[in-house]
Amino acid sequence: MKKKPESRDSRRLFGLSRNVFIFGFVSLLNDWSSEITVRILPLFLANVLGVKTSIIGLIEGVADSTATLLKIFSGWFSDKVGRRKPLVLAGYALSALSKPLFYFAASWPFILVLRFLDRVGKGVRTSPKDALIADSTENNRQGRAFGYSRAMDPLGAVIGLLMAAALIAFGGHVVRLMTRSTYQTLVLLAAVPALISVFLVVLFIRDHPPEGEKRTRPSLSLKGFDGRFRAFLAIMVVFTLGNSSDAFLILRSQQLGLSLVEILIMLAMFNFVTTIVSFPAGVLSDRIGRLKVIIAGWFIYGLIYLGFALARSGWQVWALYTLYGAYYGATEGVARALVADVVTDSAKRGTAYGLYNAAVGISALPASVIAGWLWQSIGPAAPFLFGAVLSLIAMAALTVLTRAHRPA
C-alpha cells in the first residue's frame, strides 16, 4: 500500500503535517473576518433594517443551503479531476472579495445576495479542503488533525470579536442596539484578514492527488458507500433540523437584555471555549472512538437548547453560551474525522465530504425557516424546545448505531 504523499514529509508541528498546520491559520484569518461581518449580521438586520425573524431565518437558510449544494459538487469534482487546491483557493477568494461589499448593505434582498456569494465561496472550498486535510494525515491522527482545524477557526473568531467589542467600547458607542455606522466600520476592519488568508493558500498549501484503493469514476450518489456512513448521514439530518442558525441564539441573547458589546464578548467567550475543547476532543476521539464523543456532545446540546427556552435573564445566557462552545468543540471536528475513518478510499473522500456537508446543509434551510416561524407564531422559546427534542432523538439513534457497529 502506497504512503500518502504528505506522509513522506518528515516535517511535523504538534504532530501535524504542513498542509494541516497552514490550513489552521487560513481558517483563523477567515473566521476572524467572518465573525465580524456575518455573525453579528442578524443584529444589523433586526436593529437597523427592521427585518422580521422569519426573513432572517430565510436569509440564513438560503445561504447555508446554497453552500451545501456546492459542497456536494465541489467534493465530487475534486475527486473527478484529482485536484483539491484550485477549488479551495477559488472558494476563499470569493468569500474574501464579498466581505467589503457588506459596507453598502441597505436592504435585506441585497444582503441575501451577499450572503449567497459568501456561501458560494464556502461551498466551493469546504469539501475539497476537508478531503485534503484527511489525505494529508495518517489514519490514527485524523481526530488530532480535524480537532486542530476546528480549534483555529474559533480562535480567529475570538480575535475578531474582541477587536470589534474594543472598537465599539472605546469609540464611545456602548449601546444595546447595532447602528449602521458601527457595522460599516466593522466591515472595513474585517476585509484585511480575509485577503491575507487567500495569500496563505496560494503560497503554502500543496495539492496532492487523491490515492484511492480504486481509481473509479466518482458518482454523486450514496452508491458505493457502506451502511454505516449512510446511517450516520440520516441521523445528521434529524439533528440538523433542530439546529437552526445561531442568529436565533444572538437575537435571544439581545432579547434577554445583553448589550451589543456584551454580545460580542459573549461570542468571543464561546469561540474561546470551542478553541480549547476542539483539539483535546479530537485527540480523545482517536483513543475512545468518534461516536462516543459525538453522543456526549449532542446530549450537552439538548440541555443547552432547553436552557435557552427556559432562560429569563442575561447571566443565564452567558452560562449557556459557555456550554455551547464546549458542545461545538467536542463535535464539529470529530464528526469530520469520523467521515475519514469510514471512507478509507481517498479517491472518494471529496464526494464523501460533499455528501456529509449536504446532510447538514440541506437541512439548514427548513431548520432556520421552522425556527423563525416558531418564534413568531408561538414565542421565542419554541425553536429551542424543538431543537432540544430533535437532538435527543438523534442522540438515541446514534447510540443504536454505536451498538450495531464497532466504534471508529
Image (cartoon, grey):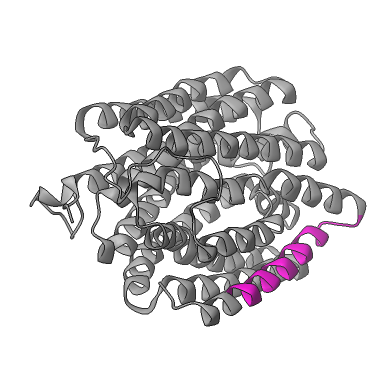
Residue 59: x, y in percent?
Answer: 71, 34
Horizontal arrangement in the rendering, residue 216 relative to residue 204 (left or right):
right
Residue in the image at 81% along x and 41% along y: 54
Where, by quadrant of the figure, is residue 204 drawn? top left
Q: Is residue 203 above or below residue 161?
A: above
| Number of numbered discs | 0
Q: Is residue 9 above or below residue 403?
A: above
For the residue pair 129 and 157, the one nearer the viewer reads as 129
Task: From the image, give the main secondary structure of the stretch colored magenta.
Answer: helix
* Magenta highlight range: 378-398
Residue in the image at 75% along x and 37% along y: 58
- Residue extending farthest to the right is 377
Residue 300: x, y in percent?
Answer: 58, 73
Q: Quadrant of the N terminus?
A: bottom left
Q: Is residue 200 above or below residue 159?
A: above
Residue 299: x, y in percent?
Answer: 60, 75
- Residue extending farthest to the left is 10
Residue 62: x, y in percent?
Answer: 69, 35
Specify whether residue 171 is in view.
no
Q: Is residue 360 above or below residue 123?
A: below
Where, by quadrant of the figure, is residue 181 drawn? top right
For the residue pair 113 and 187, the one nearer the viewer reads as 113
- Residue extending farthest to the bottom is 403
Horizontal arrangement in the rendering, residue 58 relative to residue 222 (left or right):
right
For the residue pair 231 and 361, the one nearer the viewer reads as 231
Residue in the image at 50% along x and 70% along y: 294
Residue 395 belongs to the span the image colors magenta: yes
Residue 132 belongs to the span the image colors magenta: no
